[in-house]
Image: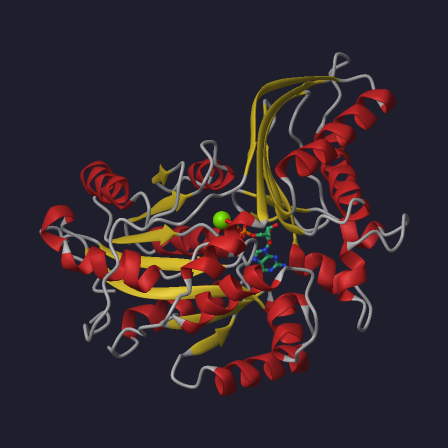
Amino acid sequence: MSGGGPSSGPTLAFVSGFLGSGKTTAIVGLCRLLGARGVRTAIVTNDQGRHQVDLAFARAAGVPAVAVSDGCLCCRFDDFEERVRELAVAARPQAVFAEAVGSCTDLVATVARPFEAYRERHGAEAGHLSTFVDVRLLGPYLAGRRLPFADHVLYIFERQLAEADVIVLNQRDRVAPERAQAVLEATRERWPRTPALLASAFDEGDLLAWYDLITSARSRPRADVEVDYARYTEGELALAWVDRTLRLCDPLGADLAATVVALLEATARRLRAAGLAVGHLKAHARGEAGEAKLGLVAGDVAEAAEGEAIVAAFYGVAESGAEHDRVSLQTPEGAAGDSVPRLGSTVELLVNLRAVGDPDAVAACLDAAVAELLSRVAVTVDTVEGAAFRPGVPRPRHRLTGPGRGPR
Ligand SMILES: Nc1nc2c(ncn2[C@@H]2O[C@H](COP(=O)(O)OP(=O)(O)OP(=O)(O)O)[C@@H](O)[C@H]2O)c(=O)[nH]1
Ligand SMILES: [Mg+2]
């Protein structure tokens, strides 16, 4: 990334990687670090839905952010360019991070190359494509163990890694160092031409090492990977997207943070019991006393599973599987650890739930968790809006392959 002077446009780093791998956490963390060092940054978030937890979280952290919504960057390429132009004027960033939807692949051909080719339209430089992956999922995947996703979903997971300029093995703080190192070595064996690093999205040194890699990695031809769109489409269609905005209120004025955590954990428990493997259950909660992002990802469930039982862990092995349903919390400043931040007694909760299965069945788990909550505590819950759908067939606006070189 050149860093861009006042007269040149920003450099744009593309960030892909499976649902819940830690893209937003790392990007927001890095933007805050760079901001403290005087580098102006901005973020483009992207989702198939309209109301994005990632956008809310980036803005809560004070990073200028815009969203490409209702489709992925490749299908909404013109909108993507427009948003980048808008950002360049509004925030004059030197570095922009564009996060792709976690179920997207083929980004080199359909996003990075077209972005390079149409530089004069938006004025930004195309940088590297970093692919994030949860080390807790990649380890078992490379070892040939079964993961609870259909083959076509795993196809997307694998293609994202195959086309990366840089692979970031994230969530390293969640596994023993020697295990993380073994996954790094297996990754280098599988994709020997691709620089790979272990990271925790909450570790400043790791984030700066990632930045260093994407700003200094030598130019190399962008990887031209084949993508079988029939399989890619099958993978997308196997997933469910459920978005919901809820307004919770405690009439006695009590803080609702623990209630929000309980609601999401009950949703996770019901998904498991229904055999619907979670990709990412994420939420942004904003109350009069504070805000937080809450989440549970596939890797958390895999981590909670013992030994070979990863698949079983996703499918209701134990009613008492509290470990499997533990939601983690983040404040705009960073990891919240075990402490639950105060939110207040009136909370707007935006839920983005991505799982494998039928959208109505996934939505029903959230509905049932709300009903369970209402039967237990005296809060009111109003649904402001909601949607349940499948991500849809990928139809890129452009697809460019060829001998073009990667970022300089
Ligand atoms: N301990 C730990 N938790 C992490 C790390 N990175 C992300 N998380 C947590 O993992 C969850 C998912 O992180 P996100 O940054 O939202 O993941 P994402 O890839 O942007 O997810 P999608 O946009 O839904 O695909 C959140 O609950 C984070 O707090 C990490 O390196 N270590
Ligand atoms: Mg994200």
Residue 5, x across and y down, in percent: 14, 56
Q: Quadrant of residue 144?
A: bottom right
In the image, residue 255 sits, relative to residue 116, either above or below, namely: above
Residue at 40% from the left image edge and 36% from the top image edge: 70
Closer-to-camera residue (86/201)? 86
Q: Is residue 8 visible?
A: no
Residue 265, x across and y down, in percent: 76, 41
Residue 20, x across and y down, in percent: 57, 54
Residue at 49% from the left image edge and 84% from the top image edge: 188
In the image, residue 154 sits, relative to residue 41, either above or below, namely: below
Left or right, 24 with respect to 240, comes to: left
Quadrant for the N terminus, please: bottom left
Q: Is residue 323 visible?
A: yes
Residue at 62% from the left image edge and 77% from the top image edge: 180
Q: Residue furthest front?
A: 230
Q: Quadrant of residue 89?
A: top left
Left or right, 217 with respect to 148, comes to: left
Left or right, 310 with respect to 38, comes to: right
Residue 122, x across and y down, in percent: 15, 47
Closer-to-camera residue (377/140)? 140
Its colouring scheme is secondary structure
Give the mark count.
Answer: 0
Q: Quadrant of residue 186?
A: bottom right
Quadrant for the C terminus, please: bottom left
Closer-to-camera residue (150/193)? 150
In the image, residue 245 sits, relative to residue 217, either above or below, namely: above
Left or right, 306 with respect to 129, comes to: right
Residue at 81% from the left image edge and 54% from the top image edge: 323
